[in-house]
Amino acid sequence: MVDLTYLKSIGLVLLVVVTAVVVVHADGDGDDEGVHWAVLVAGSNTYDNYRHQADICHAYHIVRKNGIPDDRIIVMMYDDIAHNPLNPFQGNIINQPNGTNLYPGVPKDYTKQEVRPEVFTKILTGDEEGLEKIIGRKGKVLKSGPKDYVFINFADHGGPGVFLFPHDGLYSDDFHKAVLEMHEKKMYKQMLFYVEACESGSMFFNFTQLSEINVFATTSASPDEPSHGCYYDDVRKTFLGDVYSVNWMQDSDKENLKKETLAQQFKLVKSKTWGFSHVSEYGDLNISKKPVADFLGTLNSDSNSKPYHFHSGSTAPDPRLDAVPAEKVKEEILLRKIAQLTGDEREQHKTELGKLWQIKKATEEFFRFIVGDVIQESLFEHFVKQPIKLSDFPCYKQSVKLIMRLCPGLDVPQNYYAVRKLRVLANLCDSTISAEQIWRSIGQVASRSKICA
């Protein structure tokens, strides 16, 4: 006679085993399915750019909370904010008013002078040997495979076809080359980019292969407009976040990412950023139908990570209330300090503001003189306002590099007025004016401009 009690116990064991297998599969960490990877990059430095590192620290806690382990998260940030002398709360970085301290636990995989374009591309392409030659040590790189999901979050300054790092730029042609190499090496099943930078759309809008190589990207701005900082803090005296980044992260903090699709999040972020910049999407739009969790992690919690509690997005102020174009952030910080302070400190900041305005004026004159030298100075505004095409990228890239070499005083990577005027070079290169004529003009203007000294 069959022992029913025994059969029931066997059935229960089988049910537990099957359930366990299903859970592993759903989390994306089983032997038969891919896993999640994240590369998080704050490409700027200095306390005025506090917000970029705050964005990335927040992004780290989101992907960590959702189950991506530290060995599959790579973080690049200069790490000069948390313990900066200007920070009244040492070891503390927040991303919204009265927010949670986001600095504890964030990996310091690449900091200080290692935050540069060639390091970033070596990480993306999984080039361990090439990376070691550059930085003189072994470092974490993507070791993802053909079944894996890769999430890249980049927060920084940008210009036409360029992401700015503290001392140099990553140009769109080199960026495209790195992404195509990832595809050729079968380093992902699908890949997602969330990019916070001025004119960030220009890094993707002419990347013709993007929709064919399983990549989806959203950007904080179109190819022709600035990104915006937000959440000025009267005590910290800097901006805590960026409008686009704050919107997607506050949404990720409160929504069920297994149910919300990338398209739904994009639509929400676009509507909440509307009026300041046009949040844009590029690449394979079919990927946008997938859940956000497919890229930010499929777990709702992670018992191996430290507890992470963040204010619900619904309790945070609208980031658009004090939004400022990225190029004007430093200027706005000084204006607010002057309005708030008295005595010698106030006078000191007034002097700093005066110097900043001088740099702004000299920067505009530099690019205006280039236009005047090659065609006619009165057409300067035309080349500033004309939508960029970047159809002659070699001419444009060489023009930017030439300015960096011949006019070090302009300090393009740190001069955000200059970064926004790079579009003048892009549009000149797309005109009937020859590249040689543009380069010759840059040399002549640099030789007589005081700001280049």
Image (spheres, rainbow, N blue to C red):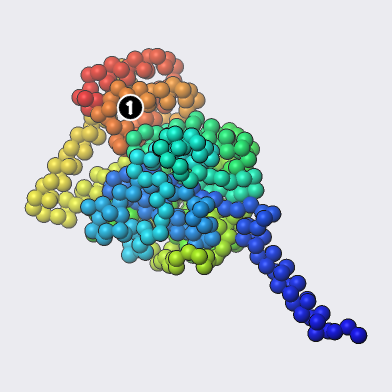
- Amino acid type at image mark 1: Met
Vertical placement of 366 versus 295: above or below?
above
Vertical placement of 241 versus 180: above or below?
below
Determine crowd level at label 1: few under 14, some 14-19, many 20+ residues with C-alpha closer than 10 A.
some
Q: Residue furthest right?
A: 1
Residue at the spot x=49%, y=41% of the render?
123
Q: Quick one: SS at disc 1? A: helix
Report which quarter residue 408 is drawn in.
Answer: top left
The quarter of the rendered structure image containing the C terminus is top left
Residue 217 image offset from top left, x and y in percent: 53, 44
Count every numbered label the image shows and give the total. Answer: 1
Question: 163 or 18: nearer the eye?
Answer: 18
192 displayed left or right of 82:
right
Residue at the spot x=54%, y=60% of the render?
67
Residue 184 image offset from top left, x and y in percent: 62, 35
Residue 232 image offset from top left, x and y in percent: 29, 55
Residue at the spot x=46%, y=22% of the render?
394
405 displayed left or right of 205:
left
Residue at the spot x=44%, y=17% of the render?
432
Report which quarter residue 331 is drawn in.
Answer: top left
120 displayed left or right of 12:
left
Report which quarter residue 6 is drawn in.
Answer: bottom right
**Residue beneath disc 1:** 404
Residue 201 image offset from top left, x and y in percent: 48, 39
Question: 319 or 45: nearer the eye?
Answer: 45
